[in-house]
């Protein structure tokens, strides 16, 4: 079962919309057996270190049933409405690449120091770690050839099923 990471709703601005990760935590408690996830978190909405920690929290609440998804984001009205910078598509795709590196490292390393073009960490911690990183699915939203290549190159990644195809993680 998946929810979505939008503040205004995926398309219409008229329907009330709950925040995706808060809703996902509630879903983790109520839904007892199905895998859950947020299709997909926009890289511009949250610092990837914070998002990694949020995902670990939901992963533990759900007893390891979380599938994690991240994408470049597309809803310009949400960005404007909340005062969130809305970079060019190529910049957002590069941000996804860097965010995946940060998140993956936080989930497998004890402490992470990282200096990137978009994100910087200094001795960042993400404990407890996720239940089973080696079997965890990382989903990337695919709207361009560069995103498709990025998804295929990322260990334990896949392509968001709503965006055409799925590739199960191998590590």
Image: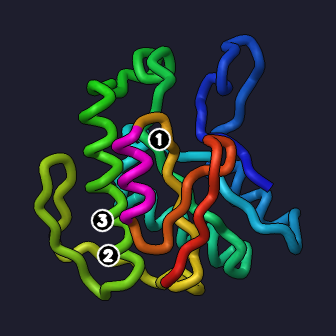
The question of residue 10 being in magenta is answered with no
Task: Report the residue at 59% width, 29% height from top.
Answer: 7
The residue under label 2 is 105
Q: Residues within 10 Å of mark 3 (few under 14, many from 20)?
A: many
Q: Estimate the spatial distance between the alpha carbons at disc 1 and disc 2, rounded to whole Å.
A: 19 Å
The residue under label 1 is 42
Q: Position of residue 150 (x, y in %)?
A: 36, 54
Q: Determine the secondary structure under disc 3.
A: helix
Q: For residue 34, which quarter of the picture?
A: bottom right
Q: Residues within 10 Å of mark 1 (few under 14, many from 20)?
A: many
Task: Report the residue at 58% width, 82% height from top.
Answer: 135
Q: Estimate the spatial distance between the alpha carbons at disc 3 and disc 1, rounded to whole Å.
A: 15 Å
Residue 101 located left or right of residue 57: left
Task: Report the residue at 31% width, 87% height from top.
Answer: 110
Out of 1 and 90, give the one closest to the viewer.
90
Task: Report the residue at 71% width, 74% height from top.
Answer: 65
Q: Is most of the magenta stretch helix, strand or loop? A: helix
Disc 2 vs disc 3: Cβ atoms closer than 8 Å?
yes
The residue under label 3 is 102
Q: In this picture, which residue range is highlighted in magenta?
A: 145-153
Of the image marks 3 and 1, the number of the one nearer the N terminus: 1
């Amino acid at each position: 079962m998946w929810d979505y990471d939008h503040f205004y709703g995926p398309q219409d601005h008229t329907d009330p919309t709950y925040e995706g990760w808060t809703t996902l935590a509630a879903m983790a408690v109520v839904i007892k057996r199905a895998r859950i996830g947020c299709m997909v978190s926009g890289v511009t909405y949250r610092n990837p270190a914070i998002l990694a920690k949020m995902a670990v929290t939901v992963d533990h609440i759900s007893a390891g049933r979380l599938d994690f998804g991240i994408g470049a984001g597309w809803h310009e009205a949400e960005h404007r409405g909340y005062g969130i910078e809305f970079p060019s598509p190529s910049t957002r795709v590069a941000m996804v690449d860097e965010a995946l590196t940060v998140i993956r490292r936080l989930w497998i390393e004890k402490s992470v120091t990282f200096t990137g073009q978009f994100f910087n960490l200094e001795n960042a911690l993400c404990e407890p770690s996720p239940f089973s990183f080696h079997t965890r699915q990382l989903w990337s939203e695919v709207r361009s050839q560069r995103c498709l290549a990025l998804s295929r190159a990322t260990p334990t990644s896949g392509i968001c099923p709503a965006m055409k195809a799925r590739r199960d993680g191998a590590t």
